[in-house]
Amino acid sequence: AQSVTQLDSQVPVFEEAPVELRCNYSSSVSVYLFWYVQYPNQGLQLLLKYLSGSTLVKGINGFEAEFNKSQTSFHLRKPSVHISDTAEYFCAVSEGGGSNYKLTFGKGTLLTVNP
Amino acid sequence: DSGVTQTPKHLITATGQRVTLRCSPRSGDLSVYWYQQSLDQGLQFLIQYYNGEERAKGNILERFSAQQFPDLHSELNLSSLELGDSALYFCASSDGYEQYFGPGTRLTVT
């Protein structure tokens, strides 16, 4: 069975600092990987996804992530954060795609950007 | 805006009651997924429907059931509600590569 571990439940940073949110997964088959963001009292918005191809994936709002198969990791990075990036971030994995796949989510990382 | 709609936005009900949550997928998407988000369990997959048929089940309680109708909208039915069922319930529709989430229904059981 697949699982996702987000190593940090909370990450406080100052505005304009770089940030990395860590995500490790376990699966016995090839996977698709996702990062979602949830702003307070809102739904989930997709930041970026890895389906295949280049292991460096660029997403919205200046975020990027790198798929590392040997380390089973998919860490999210941003070189310079803004106050508006304060939100909860979820890493998710699915075993394949097509018409039948479910997402397994990590517990989430609360990113707090301070002035 | 993901194109997925969910109603109602908020629901407050008492223990023992039954409620129905509704989801309309994006135009053209045949798959609908239901997830529960709670403080205790985080985000958990409940159930998936594809073109009217149940495709996968996750950690869904026997008190919960779902269906997908011919127009592809889906309903999640929760019965004999308990305090622990209070949570945010999301539905998502999929084009096979990405899941698009609705805004969620916040259920409060008192």
Image (cartoon, coloured by chain):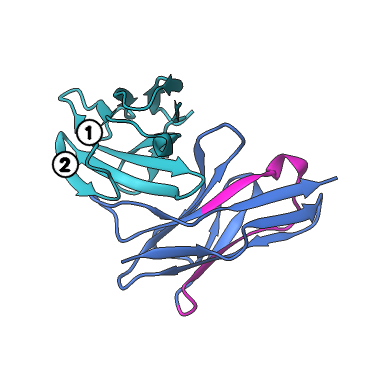
For image coordinates 74% across by 50% down, the residue present is: A81
Left or right of A113, for residue B80: left
The residue where tag 1 is placed is: B66
Given the image, what chain letter belongs to the residue carrying mark 1? B
Q: Position of residue A54 (x, y in %)?
A: 47, 66
Residue A60's label in the rendered image is none
For image coordinates 51% across by 55% down, the residue present is: A107
Q: Which chain did the image draw in cyan?
A: B
Say yes or no: labels 1 and 2 on the same chain. Answer: yes
Query: Looking at the image, which is closer to me, B33 or B105?
Result: B105
Q: Is residue A99 visible?
A: no
| Identity, as a three-letter code, of the amino acid under mark 2 | Glu
Q: Which SS class for mark 1?
A: strand
Q: Position of residue A87 (x, y in %)?
A: 64, 43
Above or below residue A99? Residue B77 is above
Q: Quadrant of the N terminus of chain A?
A: bottom left
Above or below residue B51? Residue B58 is below
Q: Which SS class for mark 2?
A: strand
Q: Is residue A88 magenta?
A: yes
| Identity, as a three-letter code, of the amino acid under mark 1 | Ala
Q: Quadrant of residue B48?
A: top left
Given the image, what chain letter belongs to the residue carrying mark 2? B
Instruction: Determine the residue located farthest toward the bottom in the rendered image.
Output: A70
Q: Quadrant of the C terminus of chain A?
A: top right
The residue where tag 2 is placed is: B54
What is the C-alpha distance between the residues marked 1 and 2? 9 Å
Mark before the other along the chain sequence, 1 or 2: 2
Q: Is residue A83 magenta?
A: yes
Residue range in magenta is A70-90
Q: Is residue A66 visible?
A: yes
- Does the CB distance between marks 1 and 2 fall below 8 Å? yes
